[in-house]
Image (spheres, rainbow, N blue to C red):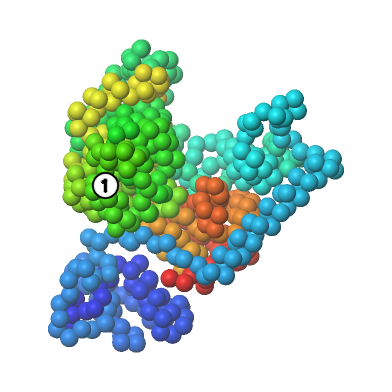
Amino acid sequence: MRYEDMDLVLYGVDSMFNFVEKYLENRLGSKEIPEAVIKYVDLEEDRNILTLKNIKFEKNDANNNIAIGKQKNNKSISNKEAISSPDQKSLNEFPQIAWWIVVWIYLAWALLNLKGYFKVAMHKLGIMKHSANEEYFKQKDFVPLYSSFESFYTRFLYMCRRDVFERPICSSPSAKTTILERMTKDNGWTFQFTGRKIDVINVGSYNYLGFAENHGPCAQAAANAIETQGIAPCSSSLEGGQYHTQKELENLVAEFLCVDAAICFSMGFATNSWNILCLVDKDCLIVSDEKNHASLILGCRLSKCPIKVFKHNDMKDLEKILREAILYGNRKDKKYRPYKKILIVVEGIYSMEGSICPLPEIIALKKKYNCYLYLDEAHSIGALGKNGRGVVEYWSCNPKDVDIMMGTFTKSFGGVGGYISGSKTLIAHLRKRSPLVRYSQSLTPATIQQVYQSMRIIMGKDGNGQKRICQLAENVRYFRRKMKKMGFVLYGSDDSPVVPMLIYFPEHLINWGRETLKHKIGCVVVSYPATSMIEARARICISAAHTKEMLDTVLQEFSQIGDEMGLKFSYAVVN
């Protein structure tokens, strides 16, 4: 049998298990994989074909992959018909749950709000006291400083659950970290340290490649820089200049990304929020993905530029907005003048969704409608691509097709700060116009060396960075496959190191955060307003520093907690 004689072609063990699970669930009403199939994964060359309910499993001895599919009569298939291949990428998944689960989630939020308003009534009657700051009574006729709902949400819904957020750590955020235990006597308004330290497996930090260490070549280079150059430049780049090593770092960033030039800043959030306004004005148009990070949203708003939002990763919606913008021009202008420029703003990996942007399709639309593209690679740089060059390399795109490439040093490089790269004209423009050049402190010597050394390792100049990149990819796929197999609902792509696990219910989310700490797991939980009310989640970040034993421990504890709390919602997925 030839591979082109099959309806479906699946490469790799992960694809095999996923396909068999779906097949068995549809045909037999069960997800359990027969023992014969499991054994087949480990076979060498003594047995190459196994038939199960008209499904054929055939091992490709040439590259040690496995092809799975229904036999087809001498008809070849195109690449579009293939489900997965070494050149194809994992699809973004956003499973939708049944309507009755959504109803229960809204009821849970309604009960929480009723409980909060009950506390408000008790406070007004003088029965209950709280520690919240209030408006000065002599200013009762003034316009309120705070939004009434935001104040209510903070005082009565957030503060009493604040123990699962803002946890202080006292070690490097590597694969294992140390958390300072604390307690509260006033429902989260204040905390006292108990003196106890808790060692946990860290699945909450963006330490994708494991460079956030207090030892090794990067840490040593940072320590040496402090001894020779001090702690900080204590001035902005425009006024006091910058260290010569920062220029070396900018040249290395440009080389790493295969672009003409780059400029570095001391804060990743500000790199977005204070540079977008240098690129557009009120006569331009920004088209932004609805799931973009807060820094991008703030930067777009500060630009005073008209903003249109398209559905997450929806290329049809994006093209519709671009076509209408070109056809009708600026509708806020009485003369409907055409926009001077249209800027598409997207991310490589979306930090809350774990999804990867369809960059080739975005570039095609950008070229079709003569737009500019701003790509935020904060979470994808270092974590995606064969050589860690981010989503551009992941999709085998030309870096020249992306007009503005932004990224941060906070994640894969274990440092702090951000960069923007692109053409020499773009970088020269930012050096003159960016507020960060005028008013923000330039990078510190220790940060420069941390990022410089880690980037050289990734590039293979001072170490084997390829091993870290491969290890991260293996850890991500292994962890995601096991989580799905246990029944948890995950968002995003199987190639993304950001793993959002849907918990849905607000009280379950808080209990999850508390229980994982009891089981010595450091995990981040996220709820409204950072997500929609019905999509509360735990955000898990996988690192190359995690060993298989660590991941197995995390999976075992997650499975136990999930069973106890009833959080394995795969039974309620409707698509």
Indicate whether 50 appears above or below 260: below
Quick check: 404 left or right of 77? Answer: right
Name the quadrant containing residue 269.
Answer: top left
Name the quadrant containing residue 90.
Answer: bottom left
Q: Amino acid at mark 1?
A: Tyr
What residue do we see at 56% from left, 65% from top? 102
What residue do we see at 36% from left, 59% from top? 92
Quick check: 562 left or right of 457? Answer: right
Give the quadrant of the N terminus.
Answer: bottom left
Report the number of discs.
Answer: 1
What residue do we see at 60% from left, 60% from top? 106
Give the quadrant of the C terminus.
Answer: bottom left
Residue linked to disc 1: 328
Can residue 191 be seen here? The reply is yes
x then y, percent, for residue 375: 30, 42
Quick check: 516 left or right of 493? Answer: right
Name the quadrant containing residue 293.
Answer: top left
Disc 1 secondary structure class: helix
x then y, percent, for residue 15: 33, 69
x then y, percent, for residue 499: 45, 54
What residue do we see at 59% from left, 66% from top? 103
Q: Using the image as rendered, state which of residue 335 and residue 11 is in the foreground.
A: 335
Give the crowd class for mark 1: few <14, some 14-19, many >=20 residues within 10 Å.
few
Residue lying furthest front: 334
Can residue 256 be seen here? The reply is no
x then y, percent, for residue 144: 64, 32
